Image (tube, rainbow, N blue to C red):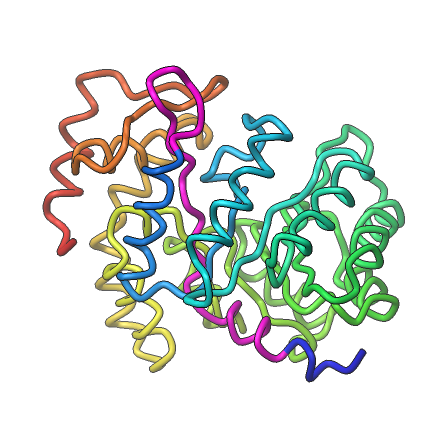
């Protein structure tokens, strides 16, 4: 399969890669109509790349049936307005089943979550991703890398065997480490997505990234679009103005070892009347005294 086949997927990754929340109803189930409304809001805000079943969507708190539901809702609602990549992971048979479901539902790509296992070998990392990529050769595959010990040569080894590995969501909080990893793997061989969102986007773009993921985009699509446009223009001062604008929001998300990553986004959406604030354990809603600050930030953005 030629690399030209994956041109659309590669272009979609060089953008704001939105990670939608999964809204819950009062009874704890996935609130389908609200989910669709939030997706439409992203699309109307100019977002053209959407990851269903990402971490901001509480991937690890959803049941297998709910993950399938989220995939199907997303592909159906998005239609042809955006490219959908679906988060897959857990044990290998589950990941392969999810990837094939994503293909059958009409998604263009899968993002492979970092393997959750106490004993991850570098060669085993390659085996895990190769098995998933080979199960869906017609889909673009995007490894989500959070392991700073993984060498760039391992990613190159994976891509040698699987030409559908077209991009990388890189989420090690060290821009210099990212720069070295990308060059060891092949800077021009993959689309590099800054997987730690807007706070790291400017430093990662300076080292070769061309896209970034975002949970904040659920709240203020225009803010995220403003950053990608500044970065594409090479206007780092303008990008850093956006960085200053989102800094406190992202600091709140990162508090307590990222415990509030999803919580703060849902709190902002709740303050805007867009969805309930409910998150599932092991996440927890913000205490009442912290909600006002999030609401004030959200209301201050140009929505």
Q: Main secondary structure of the magenta part?
A: loop
> From the image, which quarter does the N terminus lie in?
bottom right
- Identified at 60% across, 58% down, the residue is 107
Residue 191 rendering spot, x and y as whole percentages:
60, 71
- Identified at 44% across, 69% down, the residue is 15
> Residue 134 magenta-drawn?
no
**Depicted 228 relative to depicted 95: above or below:** below
**Occupied quadrant, residue 152:** bottom right
**Depicted 195 relative to depicted 202: above or below:** above
* Closer to us: 109 or 129: 109
Span of residues in magenta: 7-31
* Closer to us: 241 or 287: 287
- Identified at 17% across, 43% down, the residue is 298
Residue 129 rendering spot, x and y as whole percentages:
79, 52
- Identified at 45% across, 49% down, the residue is 19
* Closer to us: 73 or 195: 73
Judge from the rendering whether residue 141 lies leftward or rightward of residue 76; answer left or right.
right
* Closer to us: 250 or 279: 279
**Depicted 261 relative to depicted 74: above or below:** above
> Residue 17 magenta-drawn?
yes
């Amino acid at each position: 399969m030629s690399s030209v086949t994956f041109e659309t997927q590669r272009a979609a990754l060089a953008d704001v890669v939105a990670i939608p929340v999964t809204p819950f109803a009062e009874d704890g189930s996935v609130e389908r109509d609200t989910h669709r409304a939030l997706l439409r809001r992203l699309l109307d805000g100019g977002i053209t790349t959407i990851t269903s079943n990402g971490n901001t969507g509480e991937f690890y708190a959803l049941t297998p049936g709910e993950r399938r539901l989220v995939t199907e809702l997303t592909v159906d609602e998005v239609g042809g307005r955006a490219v959908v990549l679906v988060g897959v992971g857990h044990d290998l048979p589950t990941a392969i089943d999810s990837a094939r479901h994503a293909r059958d539902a009409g998604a263009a790509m899968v993002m492979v979550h970092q393997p959750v296992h106490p004993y991850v070998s570098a060669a085993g990392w390659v085996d895990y991703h190769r098995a998933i990529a080979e199960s869906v050769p017609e889909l673009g595959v995007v490894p989500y890398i959070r392991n700073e010990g993984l060498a760039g040569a391992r990613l190159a080894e994976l891509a040698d065997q699987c030409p559908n590995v077209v991009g990388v969501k890189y989420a090690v909080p060290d821009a210099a480490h990212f720069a070295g990893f990308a060059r060891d793997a092949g800077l021009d061989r993959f689309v590099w997505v800054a997987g730690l969102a807007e706070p790291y986007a400017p430093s990662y773009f300076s080292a070769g990234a061309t896209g970034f993921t975002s949970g904040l985009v659920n709240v203020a699509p225009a803010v995220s679009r403003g950053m990608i446009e500044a970065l594409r223009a090479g206007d780092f001062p303008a990008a850093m103005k956006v960085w200053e604008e989102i800094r406190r929001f992202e600091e709140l998300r990162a508090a307590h070892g990222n415990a509030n990553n999803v919580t703060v986004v849902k709190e902002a959406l709740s303050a805007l009347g867009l969805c309930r604030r409910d998150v599932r354990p092991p996440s927890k809603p913000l205490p009442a005294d912290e909600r006002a600050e999030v609401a004030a930030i959200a209301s201050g953005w140009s929505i």
